[in-house]
Image (spheres, rainbow, N blue to C red):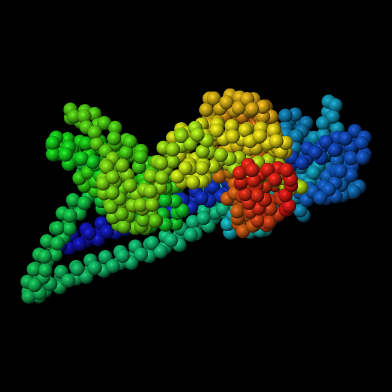
Amino acid sequence: MLILSIGIAVVFFAFVWGLVKNTTQREEDIALQAAIRRNINISTIAKADLEQVISKTKAFSNLAIALLNGNRSVAGHLNPTANGDQEYLRIVVLDQSGKLIHSSARQVTEVMAEALTKEIVPAFHKDPESRDVLVGRPDRNDSWRVPLLLKLPGQGEELGYLVAVLDLGYFLRLFKDIDIGHDGRIEIIGTDGFQFAELRRGTLSSGRNYRDSDYQERILRHPTSFGTVKRPGDDGESIYAAYRLENFPLIIATTVSVSEVLVATKERQKYVERIAVLASIAVLLGTVVLIRTTYGRRKIQMALERSQAENSELIRQLEEKSQHAYKLASHDHLTGLPNRMLFTEFAAAHLTRARRSQRYHAVFFVDLDHFKAINDTLGHRIGDILLQEVAKRYRASLRESDLVARFGGDEFVMLINDIESIDSIGKIAEKILSTVKDPFLDLDGHNLETSPSIGIAICPQDGENIDVLLKHADAAMYVAKAAGRGTYRFFDEGLNRKSGYELELLRDMRHAIRVGEFFLHFQPRVEAYGYTLSALEALVRWQHPRFGLIYPNDFISIAEKNELIIPLGQLVIELACDQIVDWRRRGIPAVPIAVNISAKQLKSGEFVGKFISTLVARDVPPQLIEIELTESCFVEDIDDISGKLKEIAALGIRISIDDYGTGFANIGHLKEFAVHSIKIDRSFVREINNTTNDAIIVDSIITLAHKLGLFVVAEGVETKDQLTHLKSVGCDQFQGYYFHRAVPAKDIESVLKNGKFLP
């Protein structure tokens, strides 16, 4: 009895503290990965901005060469402060011998520039392959004001040198409002390990030297690096993301201490540990009391006789619980899958953590159709083999993060995690149905066919705890069986109705494409300066004979999943060209019309030929048609996509990236695809005046796009405040309800004739 009590206590302690440790580690890993992603984003933006700032020295160099060649008229342009350039404080020009030729500060002598020239110029001559730009050490009194030295080439040898004093402090202060944490910092470090500037807690500093440190070795290892590292002088490790500038010997590094990242998780850990400690104390006290009671009962004979009966009952209960626990061991003995106990435990823990997530989670209750008949006719042995094979197919149909368990008999339960949409849940159920319906060949000499009936309950709308979700999924499974088996049903009847609605749309869509039930609405695109009409975007609509007017959100995904997006996309191109022809015939001023092209349509081998032949057949000038692509077009078959877009662009057709910022396209690579412009997604514009992060993202997109020579259009402009902000940061064009909603062709003709909007 005593040994059993101690053993139970030990098992309890091991289980509780093992669970605490696993939960703690999982939360820490999630927090660290989020910090790394945030640092990478900040470093990427800072790197691009710093490269742009330093590249200005090329313009100063050209002016200085002209000055050394005798053109004194350019001297006035070699003054950054007079030109409103706040990144540079001073420009100095020296001839080949180091003699001062020009000082934007109008100094007779430039001690710092002349000393820098004497110190660094030998490096140019010692290594002819050295960089054209060398970075000097900052002045002691102005620690983050850094001199840049550039060679000024002449005929056969250098004409002289240009010294440009860069204010890194001004540069870093542009990032002071970005939340990088209490202990976070942004650093600009030379490739030799010298720290030129550091922004931390809104304060600037510089002067540290990381030469020969592990920190220097880590940030220099690759042009782009991130992870954890111990910075010299810090007590603990930090999360870092470092980017080396492409043409300059500088590195942008963003760091934040691991301890700060884990502050929030540490608080939760303390709470969990307190609960575990209290539970452990309670069990320990219970064990002590039991031991003391056992010893006390041995002292008094009457108490011993009474306790013998109690102990017998207690032993019987413990034996029953032990046998029950043995039967409910963590995994099902037949399939190797988790059983009900383990599934319920894991699912409950996961759903508790998932309450902070904005994604869906679903419980599938799955029952094999006609399994009893197979068991009765072929025997339990064949039935067991079939269950084992079905379990393998279930596991293969799901992701590693999903959980599948066997509750008993032919009942299986699944927990599907982190799903973006209800449609995705239906796709997973369809995949399971398709996988299990394939014949099971040669099961001990038998070829069998079966199908599952699936009931689905969704968290949080159908319940937030596992017991409620299991109950609702079980009920939905019986609805699926009643509907004819081999199908799935949602607990929410509205979703079943949605599935039926989508099936009807799919059934009618081919006919609708043939008979002309689809037509176009048009929405204007407006120039930022002058508010003149620039172009129209063509938006497809479906006039259904039973359901009335249907918008793209209801039928585009159906078309994409069922290979109808290509004929539908071709129809939209033809309708847009026909409308251009009609307006030109009637003398109505025509502007370019932009049509949306899907990824599947673009990847089609016939797309370019059909597109061009459509324009030629209708005599539509290429300048009057534009195409808009989503970022998903640039994920696969990059070379093929690039070739097609270059062929289209060569005709004079403009190409835009629609909904930019919601996918994975790198803005720096878009020029490789002959892209002319990007359209910022409306989700960023919506909160641009309320959310600092959205404003920073939009400003950065516009800045980087302009540096790459790309045009920028903002979608979803609905208020005067949004328009004012976007115009102030240089957005080129606007589109949204503020100017005009999407309307049929006849209602947009007045806009074409007028050609201008009031701001």
Which quadrant of the view contains residue 225?
A: top right
Q: Which of 364 and 104 is in front in this view?
A: 364
Q: Which residue is drawn at 17% across and 63% down?
A: 2
Location of the N terminus by quadrant is bottom left
Taking the image as drawn, is residue 165 in sight?
yes
Front-most of 233 and 67?
Answer: 67
Q: Which residue is drawn at 20% across and 36% down?
A: 385
Give the answer, above or below, for where 101 lies relative to 4: above
Q: In this view, does 293 lie above or below 644?
A: below
Q: Is residue 175 left or right of residue 341?
A: right
Residue 669: x and y in percent read 62, 35
Residue 436 is situated, as x and y percent measured from the top left of the image, at 29, 36
Q: Position of residue 125 (x, y in %)?
A: 78, 31
Choose between 409 and 504: the one closer to the eye.
Answer: 504
| Residue shown at 54% from the left, 47% from the top | 37
Measuring 72% from the left and 34% from the top, which residue is drawn there?
Answer: 131
Give the percent coordinates (x, y) of residue 330: 25, 49
Residue 703 visible, this angle? no
* Vertical comparison of 647 with 735: above or below: above
